[in-house]
Amino acid sequence: MMYQCFRRDEDSLKHIINKMNPYIQKRGEKIVQDEALLTSPVEFSKKLLELKAEMDHMVQQSFDNDMKFQKGRDSSFMAFMNECSQTPSHIAYYADKELKAGLKGAAEEEVDARLSAIVRLFCCLHGRDIFIKAYTKFLASRLLNKTLLSQEAEEKMLEKLKVECGVNTMNKITKMFSDM
């Protein structure tokens, strides 16, 4: 309700965003600076995904998905996620674990939602090439060891990444399927 009142004046929205961004950044910095989480890529990524889901919900419910608040949220995530050099490889590792066993028995909608959540985190990375390199290595391992959980889930993930990275980057990865 406060947002409905404050959105009538553009200047007041700037003040709210200026309070929201440090809040998100502070919460995210606790995750990326936690030594215990840095030793566990799966737990590290889960915490990032939980925070992202919570902040997405907040922006959607409290701020009517206002574009200014979305940009503020995303810039905050970019700021703290890129402080840690291990973030891209940890997220790629988490994606590998999900595609190997984590999505087992999940409904198609849930698979799509979980893969989309991973890609939304990927969008906040500056080290996308590090993620892609690690993801490619993990995919090669899944293909060679025949540990693919679902061909459809793999293809969905590649389609989602193709939207964010471009066709040229993903063509090399999709070619791995035809090579097999």
Image (spheres, helix red, strand yellow):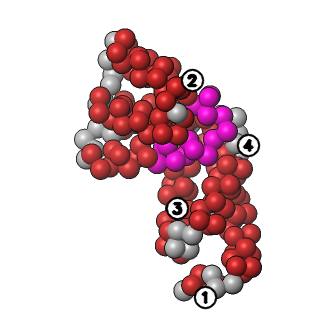
Instruction: Categorize mark 2 by other alpha carbons within 10 Å: few (<14), some (14-19), many (20+).
Output: some
Between discs 3 and 4, the one toward the N terminus = 3
Q: Is residue 6 above or below residue 46?
A: below
Instruction: Classify 1 as above or below 85.
Output: below
Q: CA distance from mark 2 to mark 3?
A: 28 Å
Nearest-to-viewer mark from 2 and 1: 1
Residue 69, percent across and down? 62, 66
From the image, tell me which residue sits under label 4: 83
Question: Does label 2 or label 1 sit earlier along the sequence?
Answer: 1
Q: Are marks 2 and 3 in contact (CB under 8 Å)?
A: no
Mark 1 or mark 4: which comes first in sequence?
1
Disc 4 residue type? Glu
Circle on res. 133: 2
Q: Which mark is residue 56?
A: 3
Q: Which residue is mark 1?
A: 5
Q: Is residue 22 left or right of residue 156?
A: right
**Of the image marks 2 and 3, the number of the one nearer the N terminus:** 3
Q: Nearer the viewer, residue 156 or 144?
A: 156
- Give the alpha-carbon distance from disc 2 to disc 4, as whole Å: 19 Å
Q: 146 and 35: which one is in front?
A: 146
Q: Is residue 124 magenta?
A: yes
31 relative to 149 in the view: left or right:
right
Q: Tell me how far mark 2 sits from mark 1, CA to CA.
A: 47 Å
Three-letter code, disc 3: Asp
